Amino acid sequence: MKIGLISRGRTQSTAIIQTLAKRHKLINNFETYFGAANAIKKELHPNNSLYDEFQLSIKNVTDTIFTSKNFVCKIWPSMLIVPPDKFESHQTFDDIKSRIIFNISEYLRISEYDQLYYINKELQHSTLSWVYAKKTRRFHRFNKHIKYNSPVITIDDNDLDRLRFYILEYCLQEKIKDFLCKQKIPYTDISETYTQYIDDSMLNTSATNNDYPNLITNSDTISKFIDDWYNICCENTIDWKYY
């Protein structure tokens, strides 16, 4: 069985694919697509662009994992974007668009999966969770029975670069869903039922359940930024489509 989990960071995707791998006895390819960026040659042939190299690397990852008939892996929109995972204030949407692989039919072989799962989380909370985890390097609780002390942080301009990128990824994930619907590729949306796909034994990937408004000193300003930037992303990517 070949299973893909369409998701992004802070959606408990790690706990879900660990559970799916365990339940169905599958190879867990985890976030293997991020390895495509590491395979890009440092010195490129003058007739090849970085984007060309990245496309080839993604295709190689896909062909490698499909040599097995029993696996599960994550599919994040950010895995299909030439790094870095930032959207700096001086960049344009065209700049980012030029780094994205939209042809997921060829490069992900998306229609060849036996089962696709889709999970998304509410934008405000998941974005605050992402930027907090990135800044503190605390992505999971390692024991759900222990209460951990969480540091208080302030979001700065560098954090905003990552935050813009993550919000754009939210929009792109929705566009992948639109593609699946348009192409009538079957998938199961587990955004509301995801707890059924997480075994209690996954203690090392427990949700942090942090109270982010009290852990981020400028959370009010950031919350407004999230809403504003999401609207900007929607307006500027209206013609972006996966195929």
Image (spheres, rainbow, N blue to C red):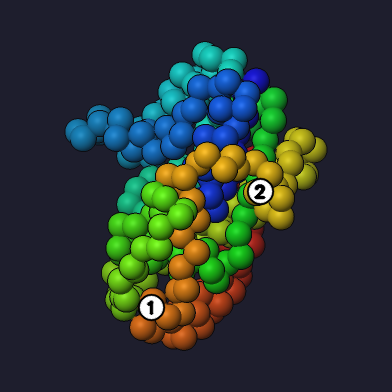
Please report the residue visible at 44 percent of the width from the left and 37 percent of the height from the top: 31
45 left or right of 94 in image: left
User: What is the crowding at mark 2: few (fewer than 14 residues within 10 Å), some, or many (at least 20)?
Assistant: some
Q: Nearer the viewer, residue 120 or 206?
A: 206
Q: Residue 232 sits in which quadrant?
A: bottom right
User: What is the crowding at mark 1: few (fewer than 14 residues within 10 Å), some, or many (at least 20)?
Assistant: some
Residue 136 visible to an observer of this rendering:
yes
Residue type of the residue flagged with mark 1: Ile
Secondary-structure class at tag 2:
helix
> Residue 216: which disc?
1
Pick out the residue farthest to the front.
145
Q: Tell me where residue 133 appears, x and y as whole percent.
A: 37, 61
Mark 2 vs 1, N-terminal side? 2
Q: In the displayed structure, would residue 140 be above or below residue 34?
A: below
Q: Nearer the viewer, residue 6 or 182?
A: 6
Q: Quadrant of the C terminus?
A: top right
Q: Nearer the viewer, residue 135 or 156?
A: 135
Please report the residue visible at 54 percent of the width from the left and 19 percent of the height from the top: 66
Q: Tell me where residue 62 appears, x and y as whole percent.
A: 50, 25
Secondary-structure class at tag 1:
loop
> Residue 47: which disc?
none
Q: In the displayed structure, would residue 22 be above or below residue 136?
A: above
Question: Which residue, given by chain and number where applicable, does mark 2 sit on?
Answer: 194
Q: Tell me where residue 75 appears, x and y as whole percent.
A: 54, 40
Report how many numbered discs are placed on residues in the image: 2
Q: Quadrant of the N terminus?
A: top right
Q: Residue 160 sits in which quadrant?
A: bottom left
Q: In the displayed structure, would residue 1 be above or below residue 127?
A: above
Please report the residue visible at 64 percent of the width from the left and 62 percent of the height from the top: 238
91 left or right of 16 in image: left
